[in-house]
Image (tube, rainbow, N blue to C red):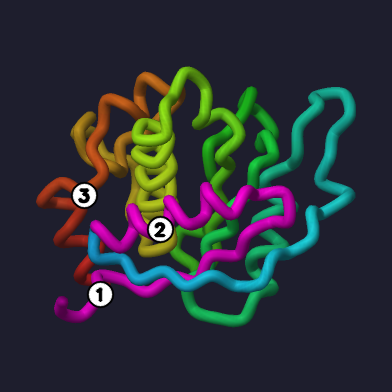
Amino acid sequence: MGEPLIKVQILPFEETPQRDLTGLIEELASLGIEATLLPKASVVPPSYNPQRKQHNAEIFLDRVRLAPGHCILGVTNRDLYVEGLNYVFGLADSPGKAAVISLHRLHAGADDMLFRARAVKEAVHELGHTRGLRHCADSRCVMAFSNSLADIDRKGKEFCVRCTHKFRGH
């Protein structure tokens, strides 16, 4: 196999199941993305909002930014939100080195294969943002905005031609 498309370090938060992390790393590898696992990080206590019963994604992203490295993907099983939205599947610096995804909602109605597909799509989507990519109008592109599980299921795991060019040109 040639040079990886991108190298990423995965920062798992302590409640994230090892099985989910292993599956994500395997799915990323199938797309030419080399992922290595960092030691588990503690859940960020001030991130929890008791009124919403969710965790603030911005605080998780702040924690990911502290990890050494050039491209870091935080992975949590907590339900994440940002102000103004009911929930988010992920959040990233665009451009930047840090991104975080939540696996919390991705298990809903999914067998292992569907869950893994959803997880890798969200990971690649957020990694695209770290390279400065914006949401894509092509609903099949991994950079298409996902407002629901149906949106995630509809899109592919890979970038469209235009987004591939932008991603590689970063």
Question: Which residue is found at the position 43% from the left and 42% from the top?
Answer: 119
Q: Which amino acid, mark 3? A: Phe
Residue 147: say if magenta.
no
Task: Please name which of the two marks, 3 or 1, marks the residue nearer to the observer.
Answer: 1
Task: Please name which of the two marks, 1 or 2, marks the residue nearer to the observer.
Answer: 1
Question: Crowding near pointer 3: few (<14 within 10 Å), some, many (20+)?
Answer: many
Q: Kindly identify which residue carries mark 1.
A: 4
The region drawn magenta spans 1-30
Q: Which amino acid, mark 1? A: Pro
How much space separates mark 3 and mark 2, taking CA atoms?
A: 11 Å
Provide the secondary structure element on which disc 1 rests.
Answer: loop
Q: Which amino acid, mark 2? A: Leu
When the figure is inspected, residue 27 is found, relative to residue 2, above or below; the finding is above
How much space separates mark 3 and mark 1, taking CA atoms?
A: 15 Å
When the figure is inspected, residue 144 is found, relative to residue 21, above or below; the finding is above
Residue 2 locus on image (x, y percent):
15, 79
Q: Kindly identify which residue carries mark 3.
A: 159
Provide the secondary structure element on which disc 2 rests.
Answer: helix
In the rendered image, which quarter is residue 65 located in?
bottom right
Provide the secondary structure element on which disc 3 rests.
Answer: loop
Question: Which residue is found at the position 54% from the left and 70% from the top?
Answer: 37
Question: Which residue is found at the position 61% from the left and 81% from the top?
Answer: 68
Quadrant location of the C terminus in the rendered image = bottom left
Quadrant location of the N terminus in the rendered image = bottom left
